[in-house]
Image (spheres, grey):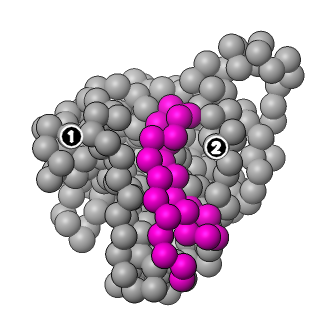
Amino acid sequence: VTGVQTCALPIYMNENAQNTCGTDDVCDSSGTGNDLASQGTAGFTTSSKIGAAATLYDGTDDYFEDATTWFNSMTAYTMEGWFSADTLNGTDANQYPIMYNLAGESLYPRMHIRGDGALRLQQKVNGLTFNVSTAAGVVTAATWYHIAVTFDTSNLVLIFVNGVQVGSGQLPAGTMDVGSSGTFKIGHDNNLSLFFLGKADEYRVSDTNNSPDYITAQYNNQNSPSTFYSMNGTESSQG
């Protein structure tokens, strides 16, 4: 995968580098050493979106976890990755966690796919929890989607699916709450005892809000590299 990276990248999960940092673990390719350890029976599948492997979750006890505090110094972020939920039950009450940060008593940000195909980000500001949701049906089951969310220093949230903005929310002024300790997880929300059932690939977190143009370029680059290169004339490189 190639793409111009406009910021520091605290975590970039390269599933193709599995097992070089621990059996069934996912190795961080950003250079910061924030590897994610396999929990439950979380492992890998060759039914990937990009490259040779994706991470696989059974919906019962599988997730990947990095028990370090790198998220807690952020004032802005971008979270993105490819996700394919095996099934969605059609109701918004059911939630399928894909990315979130557990920080002491804070459980934010939390990104879920809901049973009706909506996406929801939960973020705490000044001790209060706010939800930013998309319309229902922006994702369907058994299909790969590039999902991204950005949060900037003005507390503006933008949500993207396949490079297109599908949701937004302006949160009140104040300090983003992330707590003082950190555990970043893919596929599990232990506050609600929820687990993701499906596959994930190429997930990344960066410590700034990347622009909509950047998110679109990431999607185009990863979804169809040969077309992306042809249209742009030159090959990008990851910084």
From this view, report whether residue 141 is shown above or below residue 126: above
Amino acid at dot 2: Pro
Is any atom of residue 101 visible in this view?
no
Image side of residue 51 versus residue 239, left or right: left
Q: Residue at x 75, y 46 (%)?
A: 5
Q: Taking 155 as reference, is 41 left or right?
A: left
Q: Amino acid at mark 1?
A: Asp
Residue 212 got which mark?
2
**Residue 57: horizontal and vertical position, in percent?**
29, 43
Mark with earlier residue (2, 1): 1
Q: Which residues are magenta?
A: 151-174
In this orientation, does residue 93 appear?
A: yes
Q: How many marks?
A: 2
Whether residue 199 sits left or right of residue 87 in the image: it is: right
Q: Is residue 135 above or below residue 226?
A: below
Label 2 – label 1 distance at C-alpha: 25 Å
What is the crowding at mark 2: few (fewer than 14 residues within 10 Å), some, or many (at least 20)?
A: some
Q: Residue at the location (47% across, 53% down)?
A: 168
Above or below: residue 26 compared with residue 234: below
